[in-house]
Amino acid sequence: MDTSKIQEQFKELYGEGGTIYAAPGRINLIGEHTDYNAGFVLPGAIDKAIYCVIKPNGTDKIRAFAPDENPDKTAINSQFGLTEADKPKERWAQYIFGMVRELNKRGATISGFDIIISGDVPLGAGMSSSAALESCTGFALNDTFQLGFDLKTIALAGQATEHNYVGVKCGIMDQFASCFGKAGSLIRLDCRSLEYEYFPFNPQGYRLTLINTCVTHMLGGEYNERRESCERVVAAIAKNHPEVKFLRDAGIEYLREVVGKVKTLDYIRAEFVIEEIQRLLDTCELLTAGDYESAGRKMYETHAGLSRKYTVSCPELDFLNEKAKQYGVSGSRVMGGGFGGCTINFVKDELHEEFVEQATADYEQQFGIKPKVYEVVIGDGARKLES
Ligand code: GLA
């Protein structure tokens, strides 16, 4: 993205001296809804990011402007204080406020600042624009106020912002990927220990392509409800196996022991999670062995599980998944939290053009919406840019 515009806007509104930072959105190859179950994920940062320009203003107020939210360039969109009572009403500003609060809880002393936020991560597409905003703000504050936090703390503060100021009880995947991303590599993250390894990803002859349904069906609480299902199953299993703290700790045998003791809905959801954690481990082995076709089949299995067992898909996503199958795409599935957003498609170079052309035309004919297509470039994590 050309950032000169927001740098100019910053100068006009707040004067010279702003510093610019970026934090990316993410993809996830496989391992969905496993992070809050202490399992594994395989995300990567992308070349689309949220950018901010920031400068301390010597007051106890934050003046924040998001030109994408309000095209009136002369307006200062949101102004708020630093204490718990000062939560702004604009949702986008709540992420900034939440990061300030969460970093202060971790020992920082952040005073007032001016900030402009912009970006090219599509909103509501499952590419983690909110985590990008949290990581960007956190990284920028850490550098600007010399707070001395490591990246892990910034990622955790981002997750806590979602929990405490936005109301989404998310896992750590999105913020971690946005902070720790590395060009050319996926991140194999153990969401319990937060140990991770970079997983070079450059499968010759294949591409990763996202197709955005451009719909979102998320009803409030749908995500949190799934997390609660998992927690109820863990509680049931732990009665006989107190060492089980997360579904990660429970094999399918332990799950079988609580059949009839938990709601069927919860049981089926837990079954998906346990299978998905194993599926990720198997997929990593397949990728290491260069068996991309089998790895792609795992993505289809994930889609089937997310659609039928975890029920976080929707007709638009299922349609694109079917089309991918029909046109011979090696792997395809709904990506991220679900309920709309993108499918991620692992497609052979020679099929790519025809698939994208035909699947998007079919989709438009079926739903009357032109889907958006993004070619995935795996990029770097949060960073300071040259001003
Ligand atoms: C959202 C959440 C993540 C993760 C995914 C599903 O993106 O923010 O923590 O749970 O959904 O894998």
Image (tube, helix red, strand yellow):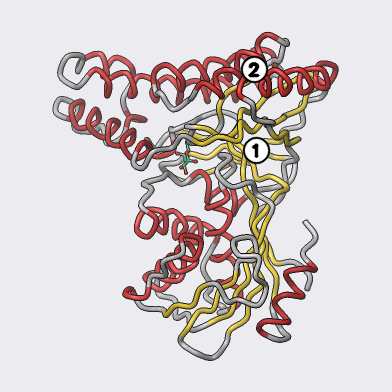
What percent of the width, then of the height, locates residue 156? Answer: 45, 56
What residue occupies the far bottom of the structure in this picture?
Answer: 58
Give the alpha-carbon distance from disc 1 to disc 2, as whole Å.
16 Å
Observer-nearest residue: 171 or 246? 171
What percent of the width, then of the height, locates residue 70? Answer: 60, 65
Residue at position x 61%, y 31% in the image? 213
Indicate yes or no: mark 2 CB to ligand 1 under 8 Å: no
Residue 38 position by quadrant: top left
Q: Looking at the rendering, in which quadrant would you find the N terminus?
A: bottom right
Above or below: residue 357 compared with residue 338:
above
Q: Which amino acid does label 1 sit on?
A: Leu
Residue at position x 64%, y 33% in the image? 212
Residue assigned mark 1: 186
Q: How crowded is mark 2: few (under 14 residues within 10 Å), some or many (20 or more)?
A: many
Observer-nearest residue: 158 or 154? 158
Q: Looking at the rendering, in which quadrant would you find the C terminus?
A: bottom right
Asked if residue 231 lies left or right of residue 173, the reply is left
In the rendered structure, find residue 164 and report the number of the disc placed on it: none
What percent of the width, then of the height, locates residue 11? Answer: 73, 81
What percent of the width, then of the height, locates residue 136? Answer: 59, 62
Asked if residue 241 lies left or right of residue 362, the reply is left
Q: How crowded is mark 1: few (under 14 residues within 10 Å), some or many (20 or more)?
A: many
Residue 207 position by quadrant: top right
In the rendered structure, find residue 296 and report the number of the disc placed on it: 2
- Camera-side mark, 1 or 2: 2
User: Does label 1 or label 2 sit earlier along the sequence?
Assistant: 1
Observer-nearest residue: 289 or 329? 329
Does the residue at mark 1 contact the one at mark 2 (Cβ under 8 Å)?
no
Above or below: residue 80 compared with residue 187:
below
Q: Which amino acid does label 2 sit on?
A: Gly
Question: Callout 1: helix, strand or loop?
Answer: strand
Residue at position x 67%, y 82% in the image? 13
